[in-house]
Every structure is written in C-alpha cells, then in structure tokens.
Amino acid sequence: MTFTRRLASALISAYEAIVLQRPIWTLAGVVLVVAVLGSFAPRFQLDASSETLVMENDEAVRYYRTIRARYGSDDFLVVTYTPREGLFTASALARLEAMRDALADIEHVAEVTTLLDVPVLEGLDAGLTELPTEPEALTCDGPDRAEDCRRLLDSDLYRNLLVSPDGRTSGIRVMLEQDEAYRAMQRERDQLRIKSHDEGLTGPEQARLAELDEKISARGAELRELEAVAIAAVREVLDRFRDQAEIHLGGVPMIAVDSIAFVRADLLTFGAAVGAFIVFILFVVFRQPRWVILPVITCAATVVSMLGLLGLLGWPVTVVSSNFVSLLLILNLALCVHLVVRYRELHDLHPDLDHYTLVRDTVRSKFEPCLYTALTTMVAFGSLLVSGIRPVIDFGWMMVIGLAVAFVLSFTLFPASLLLLKGGGPAQLRSLTGVLTGGIARGITARPGWTLLIAGLLAVAGIAGTAQLSIENRFIDYFKDSTEISQGMRLIDEQLGGTTPLDVLIDAPAEPPEEEEEFEEPDFLAGFEALEIEGDSGIASTSYWLNSARLPEIRRIHEYLESLEGTGKVMSIITAMDMFGELEPRVLTEDFFISVFYQRLPELVKETLFDPYLSEDGDQLRFSIRVYESAPDLRRNQMLQEIEQHLEQGMGYGAEHVHLTGMMVLYNNMLQGLFRSQILTLGVVFGAIMVMFLVLFRSVRYSVLGILPNLLSAALVLGLMGWARIPLDLMTVTIAAITIGIGVDNTIHYVHRYQEEIQVDRDPWAAIMRCHTSIGRALYYTMITIVLGFSVLALSAFIPTIMFGLLTGLAMTAALVANLTLLPVLLAKTERGVAA
C-alpha cells in the first residue's frame, strides 16, 4: 500500500471515529462553532461606495484622490428642482430658498449651492473695477430675484449646469462633510499598495499598511452610516416640497446608499426565495421530511457561519458579492443532494444493511468526488483573485471560504444528524427522472455521430459569438428605469449637462516659459489709477496659463472637448474669462488687465470661477467635463484615447503633461480590466482543473475528455452574450469561470462513476446506461436545483445580477446536457479505441 493510500485510510478511520461514531459530540461541536461565529453576524457590513469599483493597485486611483484633495471632491448630491408653475417665479424661488435652508440645517451637510448663491455677472450694471465685493450683491438673490435670476439663462457658465436650457429645471448641489483624515489615510494606503506591487515593502511599511487597512475599514463603515443618515434626512426634506414640484435626487453618494439598499434587499430576497426553492425541490424530489430538514439545517448553518465570519473580519459585501448567500445555499444543497441520492440508492440496493453502515458507505463513496467537486468550484471562484478588481477579488475569497465551510458541514453536521434519526425502510425511487436520463442514454447510444456533430456546430457558433464580446456598457443600464437612480441620472443628463465626471489636467512644461516682455504701463489707466499690482506684474507673469498668450490655446482645448460626442458641460478658466471679457474686452488680450482684474476679484468669484480650474501656482490647468451617461453610443475607452491622442500629439503637450482622471477614468479602467481578467481567470481555471483531474482520475484521457463538455458550455454562454450584444460587466465577467467550476462537478461525479461501472463488463455503452440511471439522477437533481436557484436572481433590482442569474442558469443547463450527451459519447468512442 502506497503512502498516499495509507494516509487516506488513516484519515477515513479518524473521520469515522470522530464524526460517525460520536454524532452527539460532533453535533455539539458544530453547534458551538456556528453559534460563536453567528454571534458576530450583527457586525456584517455592506459597501457600495465608488471605492468598490476600482482596479487594485491602480495608479489612477492615487492620482484621482490627489486631484480631488486639490480641487475639491466630486462626491456631492445633486437635486433637480422642476416647479410646476415655472422656475422663475417668486413663489418657486421662495420654495427653493426654503428648501436650501432646510437642507443646510441637516447634520453632516457642509454646503448647499443653488442658483440663488452663485455670482451672476451677465447683465450686471458695473464695470470691471466696480464689481461689488459683498457676496449678496453678486448673486440674484435680491428684491427682484425672479427677473434677476432669469439672467442665468444667458450665462454660458450656468446654463446647462445650474439651470436647464429651457429654464424649467434647476440643479441644487448638496456637499456632504468630508473627513480629511480618512482621505489622507486612503492616499497613504494607495501609495503603500503601489509600492508593494512595484518593489515590495519593508517590515514597518507592511505593518503600517495593515494598520491603515484596519483603520480605513472601521472609519469607512462609520462614514457610510453617517452618509446614509444624512441622505435619508435629505429625502425627508425633499418630500416636503414634492407637492408643487418634480424633484429627483442624484449623485455618487446617493447611488452608493441606494445600491447598499439594493444589496440588503437582494440578500433578504435571495435568501428567502432560495430557501423556499430548496424546501420545495427537496420535498418534490424526495417526499420525506428528513431529506428536507437535514439539507436545510446544513445550508442554514453554512450561511450563518459565513455571515458571522465576515462580520468578525470586518469584510463588507458589495454589489458584486451580494448574491454570495444564494450561491452558497445552492452549492451547499448540491453537496447534500449527492449524499441523499447515494444513501437512498444504497438503501434500495441493500435493504438489509443497518443505518450506520448505510451512512458510513454513503460518506465513503461520495467523500472523494465531493471533495474534488468542492475544490474545483473553489478553484473557479479563486481564479477571480487575479482579476485585479477589488469587489471581484473579495467575491472570490468569500466563495472560496464559504465553499470550504459548506463542505465541512456537509460531511459533519449532515451525517451526524442523520445518524441520530431512525433508519427507516428503503424509499421507492421515483422512475420519472430515471426514464428521462435513461432516454438520453439510449438516444446518444443510437446516434453518437449526431451528438458529436451537433456539439461541434454549437462550439463553432459559441466561439464565433465570443469574438463579438464587448466590455462597453453604461452605468445607468445597471438599474431599472423605475429606480430613482436611473430617473435622476437621465434627467441630469438631459437637463443639467451630464452625469459622469471627467477631468482633463494639463501641466505646464518643466522648463520655464519664454520670458515675457516687461510690462509697460499703459497710457490708458482710466478706472485703474488707484490700483497697484502685487509683485512685479501679477498673476499674468507668475502663471504659465493665465496670461494673454495662453488664453487662445486654452480656448482651443475647451472648444475641442465641447465638440466631442458624449460630452455635456465643459468648465475651465476660459468660461470665466469670456464672461469677464464682456465687461472689459482687454482682459482677454492684455496681461496688465488680467493681473488687475484677478487681483480685484471678490473672494466668492475667485472661489467659484477660478480655484476649481487652476492650481494655486497657476501652472496646472483643469477642464471639468460632464459626460452623458445615457448616451446610447457611449464608448468610454475610445473617447479617452481620442482626448489623450489629440492633446499629446495633435496639440503637442506630451504624455507627461496630460492627465485624465475622475470617476469615468476609474470606471473605464475597471471595464478594461474585466476583459483582461476574463482571459486570466479562464486560464487559471483550466490549468488548475486539469491538474486536479489528473490527480483524481489518474488518466490523461479522462482528464482531457472531462474538460471538453465544460469548454463547450462556457463557449455557448459567452457566445450567446456576444451574439446578443450583452456586454461584460462586474457580474457577468465571472460567468465563464463559475460555469466551468460548477459544471466540472457533473464531470467529476460522472467520470468517477463511469470508472467503476466500466470494470463490470468492459462494455462502455452498458456502463453509460448504468451511469445515466444512477449518478445521472443526482446530476439532474442538483442541476435543477442550481438552475432554479440562479433564476431567483432575476428578482434583483440590479440589472447585472439579473443577467448573471439568467445566463448562469442557462450555462448550467448547457453543462448538464453536455455532460450527459457529449461526455459519454467521447468516453465510449475513446474506450473502444483504447480497447482495440
């Protein structure tokens, strides 16, 4: 006897002595562990913030946070206000003022900006040197504000930003309080992660990174709670004004909070629905209370243990991993069904065996194939760790750990509980499933050539469709049209200049600019005699960008960005400069006047019109762009590449001086990573599964043949997505790996049984018939359970989850059919060739 077999025999003996011969102690231990873990379930967290939609170790994330700290956060709420009697009426503006004041009184709201609070220079009866310095005198919030505020429609700055072009809708910006200490910790952690990825960390740096991870996780959970409370309060205020106006809420924080609500609802809905499916299916199939109660208890213990473990580790669930509960229930049930079917089969074949022997033989015969099915499924989910996308990585870890827990409980809690019940008599096996699987066996036996031909044609169609796969998708399509997220994003796109933020930043060249000529004091100083310019010649000489030589250049960039299909509102310093040029044209052409007016600017104007678009030293230029998320032909990656190419090559700035950032860039990086991860995960899955097949089957032939049906099912589902123009997204990117990981479970059980049956008479077709009428039943039951379980995901409010459920269910059906048709034919054909 080899060492491996002696070790396996010793482990089985130890297992029987500990678990099967002492079921009460086993149950007590399991209950204690589950209870301890379950006590941490209340700490379970949900997270749907924008931080969960980024690539791991993405340099763009660090740069995004740096720019956000410099120019201000884009994490604000947007309220659209459309009064029924018209926007520019005294009553509508009075309600807008009341709404603003009520929103400003909410705890954790830092600032509220409406059209009543911004400087309006259009139509102002004042020259450049006569601008009032009091903020109130610059706004339209005066005695005749209905008429004064109408001037915003003439403003290139505010039209399509704060006021819709038709003058019916106004936008309100609600800035929530920012935790600068939290942001600083994030930036420090980003730098350490990038250094760890590029060159490695020292011991103290690794300790600091672990400390930051813990602190950010804890503080992030607190901030999410505070944000949720603040947004709930905002909604309460808005509800008080909905009787006379159409009001929608949007913005990144609101999307995050509502997504958490979707995740929470999905967890409850999926858990309850899958639980109901489990009970229903088990009762219909087995017709005995014990075969319903024991699997349900085992599955419930797995879920409780995992929720507690996630709470203990402070590991939040995101939108991507929101279906992990239903997946665990489904996969755990599949393990239990295999045990039940085998027990009933043994009891039917050997009715005189005692209860303990039946349980022991069931466990012995199913332990190895179930172990390998669990391991292959863990490998499938584990392959997601190489995706580079944080929520996908977390989802992979959750499922790997969850499957390990499910396997342990299936071979401890389930058999120990079964041993405490009376044996009973053998159950009458239902014949319908046997007739179905037997009919499939007779069909492929009669027409094996047709089976191979059809499989070949489907494979070609699947591969051709896979070539049509796309990763371009719109975030707005993730939500149903009935959700406030979708409605708000669409209205902001249509009326207020776009939803998704994109920043284009251009740095001054490293070498100093050519020396400008010394200012000669103009001989036309009417209105400026009393002014002195701080420094030598003011901002026009110290800033690379804010001078008469560069303004035409900035205008060309601005106009180019505005001309792009898909861009909405574009903001830069040229927007403000053109507005000031109407008051004094020379501020566009003469550096002296640029310096004078910039020095003379009221603080409110400078903070609103210049600080967000020009760095403090004047050497970095920022263009703030809003992209139409609802544009039907939006191609993010193509747009970003076009902008970079035009600025770097067409305008000659060079790649080192041009930077694109914002949520659009981070989201696009994530989408591009999806395609790369699809290739990586499939490669990892196939490689690992091939190794496991070689260990389990001890045959290259069986290992290669076992891969083929699962390749076919993966090609079919990806091909269908390609032909149907269903793009890869956060959820569907995992389908192929999961399909293969779960589909090979069928392969393992079938080939394992076939290896036993072929020894009986060396007749492959007879062995196939016996496999179909025995293990075929279990495969049918488990796959029906899995397919129906995945169909429950169609109840989600999150469109990618719906598509994931339906497509995975279809893929599982294809995997079952392929393993009951193509696999047996391949086994029989090659068996005869080997025998010959």
Image (cartoon, rainbow, N blue to C red):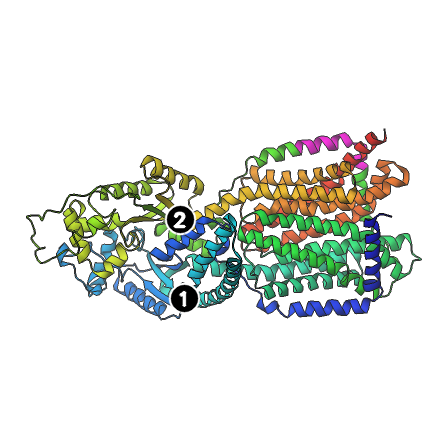
In the displayed structure, would residue 459 be above or below residue 257? Answer: above
Magenta region includes residue 453: yes
User: What x and y, as percent, mark residue 606?
Assistant: 24, 57
Q: Identify the element where label 1 is drawn.
A: helix
Residue, disc 1:
234
Q: Earlier in the sequence, mark 2 or mark 1?
A: 1
Give residue 156's position: percent from left, percent from top. Answer: 26, 49
Q: Nearer the viewer, residue 254 or 87?
A: 254
List x then y, in percent, for residue 38. 65, 68
- For the stretch drawn in magenta, the main secondary structure is helix
Label 2 sits on residue: 661
As helix, strand or loop, the secondary structure at mark 2 comes to strand
Q: What amino acid is found at the position of numbered circle 1 in the picture?
A: Val
User: Which circle marks residue 553 in the picture?
Assistant: none
Q: Is residue 343 visible?
A: no
The x, y position of residue 227, in whole percent, is 45, 65
Residue 650 visible in the current orientation? yes
**Crowd band around label 1 with a 10 angstrom C-alpha radius: few (<14), some (14–19), many (20+):** many
Q: Quadrant of residue 263?
A: bottom right
- Specify the segment rendered in magenta: 442-458
The mark lying in front, picked from 2 and 1, is 2
Task: Please tell me how crowded label 2 is: few (under 14), some (14-19), or many (20+) other residues with Cα within 10 Å.
Answer: many
Amino acid identity at mark 2: Thr
Q: Is residue 541 left or right of residue 219?
A: left
Q: Residue at x 23, y 64 (%)?
A: 141
